[in-house]
Amino acid sequence: MHAFDPNDYRKRVLAAVERRGGIEQSDPFELYDIPLDEAETLGDAEVSARVAEVWGFWQRQRDHPKYRVLVGLLVENHDRLSFLLLDASARRAEAIRIRREREQRDAERYEMLDTAISRLVQRHGGVPAAKVPGLEEIGAMGGLNAAEVAARLRRHRIIEDERPQAAPAVTGALTDQRRGQIRALLTEWGRLVEDPPPPTLLGLLGLDPSRATHTGEIRLRADALRARARELPPGRMRVVLDELLVHVQDLLEPGGPVVAEYVASIVEDVTAELRPKVRAAVLVEDELVGEDYEFLFDEAIALGMDPHAAGRLLEDLAVELGSRAVGSARHAPPVRTPASSAPSPAPPRRLWEEPLKAARAALRNGRPQEAARHIAEARGLDPHNEGTTPIRSVSDDVERVLAEAALHWRVALAARAATRYVEALEHLRELRRTAADVPPPTGHTAEIDELLAEAERAVAEADRLVAAAAAGPAADRSRTLRAAQAACVDHPGASEAMAATPIPAPGRVTVTRMANGSVRVVWVPVSAEDVNYRVTRLQPDGSWRVVGRTRGTELEDGGAPPGETPVYAVAAAISGSYSDTVRSDAPPEPGADRTAPPGATGPSGSMAQTAAVGAGGSTIEHGTVVQPDSGFPPGQAAQPNPAVRQTSGSVTEPSGVARPDPAATRPEQIAPQAATSAVAQDDPMPSGIPVVTGLAERAGLLTFVWPTGITEVMVVARTDGPPAAPDEPEARAWKVTNMRYEIDGGVRVPPDLPRPCHIAVASCRREPNGKLTVAAGFAPDARIHWTHA
């Protein structure tokens, strides 16, 4: 048995199982990557080891962006799937059953191809060479590649049939890039107005290509649409409509050859869409008739063509493929027959046509599961495989829509969990339009209408708060905008307004050299809520080093160099945005005395609560030195950090054990709340971004659990002490994506990084405008002491 390779397994097994529709379309030998041919020779120990290895891999893939749902089902059904593999006798019996199932599955894969080949051999005595491309397309519907189709065709004689090749289409001035932009904008417009998207710019104006030369009418309709656009409030809907109207102005309103080129591009797109379907329909019978003609005729109109052009296009495609289009009774004029002539016999009724027609209608109405039931019924009514090609064509469309619906569900639920309701709303609306009858994935019970209402409420609440922030007092603006982001993280208006809202800078910064050699930094706080302060020290080489972060108004730097007191700078931070820095050597403001004396109190009147994160990253809690990321085993004492000292309440012995200071514990020496005020530790959710958990070392890799909605993290390492912030100049930092993490099975620590060292992981958030926001700090359990070589 070959060695287990996670990357190869993901590409070879998970991708195939996902493509076939899930674990019910697979078997335990494939899922656990055990060769079926070796089932009788493998020992129980080998099989048990492989099962455990794959089981562990599934556990690590539970948050994979592509296979999250599939892996969740595998984990949930692990006991049932692995039960028969762990016992030798049961494994042999299961192998016999699986072999039969695989043989039957392979027969089904070739069934449609073999049926088409058999009909062609009956009609022509062999397979015409011109029909081979069509057979390859039919084979692709069953998951066969060109080589597998060619291998099947070696059993039959190929009849050469020289046929002139069609002249290649001439590419006009309308670039493919611009055509793609127009299609994307039309699709987005359909989502915004919650209607089927218009297929073309003419459809946006309520016209079909037959009216493309009516320039006056086009201009009148475009002007009316522009007036409507001006009435829309600022937002994405207006932006999309304005961009579409620019294309209307450039491609339709000039008339003449410009609009003719655009109409030609419509015909080219519809032709490319319908050619494989027409090929599949005429491959055997050499005629495009009845139900097939009606379906393709309706599809051509839905893609933006007028009825006359749609009929002509189907005829041209049929001729191009060596066939003919007979049409349908509803499009052909009635033919009178003489009374004396005997009526021609009615064509035999094909029972599968009605459910196939119902499947097409259900698919157009956005109900793919209902369409799948009709497809199953049509197959049951086609014992002679007469309708294999049209049934398979519609079945492929149903499977595609169902696969897209599963993707929309996964993205929408992940966005909802991260309160990214704007993104969730987009996918939920697409689900309701194209797959309203597809339920949510296993483990989720909320219906689509319930989720839509929740997302719309969140976006509406964020809209209200953003408007209130713009109309309200400036002092409350930041708090209101943070509430809007809490309601909807990816609300574009809240993000833009927050970025445009200046953060007030702290007041005058005062530094004092203390008797023990450390430097005490004190500043005047800003009048805002939920403020953090970052304190930096000017280095001899002109760079700035982060000394610590705190929610209080003072910080003691025990790592300050001796001699002349250094220059310090303080900046206020709110939700990851920073104010201008205020330096300790800045001259005082004229006519204002904003100096905060030593021992200044905070807004509450009690002694300021410091989060004295010193040069070594330690914090002070209740007068005791604490190192949250020491990395020592449970029960082993962390070493004290001499760079940080508490100003009152305790003293630190050389051994690292804190004991009460008798002079500080006398009641007359203690401020009213100093003995009970706890210093704030690391923020449990820095900058409001979900944090990683379960930081650990496994097989030489750094591993952790990714929070929902987070796809990038910043890994920060220092050798001289725990990092206090991701932007420390002395620290080494690198970004890791969840895809890189999945490929490697964890984070690879650079080999040139000295050991031992301290590592911390900060979550990152990708904003709607593409900007990457890195959390301002680390969660308490997002740190580790790294000793692995």
Image (cartoon, helix red, strand yellow):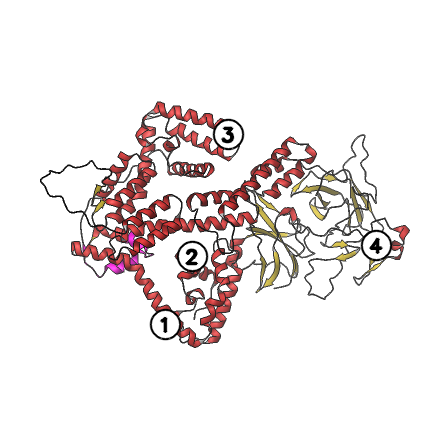
Q: Which residue is mark 4?
A: 649
Q: Earlier in the sequence, mark 2 or mark 1?
A: 2
Which mark is nearer the camera, 3 or 2?
Answer: 3
Which mark is nearer the camera, 4 or 2?
Answer: 2
Q: Is residue 323 magenta?
A: no
* Left or right of 712 on screen, residue 787: right
Residue at 33% x, 25% y: name it: 214
* Left or right of 70 on screen, residue 345: left
> Regarding mark 3 in the picture, which secondary structure is present there?
loop
Which mark is nearer the camera, 2 or 1?
Answer: 1
Q: Is residue 220 above or below residue 650?
A: above
How many marks overall? Answer: 4
Closest to the observer: 80 or 125? 80
Q: Earlier in the sequence, mark 3 or mark 1?
A: 1
Tell me where residue 175 appears, x and y as whole percent.
Answer: 37, 36
> Regarding mark 4 in the picture, which secondary structure is present there?
loop
Q: CA gap, disc 3 to disc 1?
A: 66 Å
**Amino acid identity at mark 4:** Gly
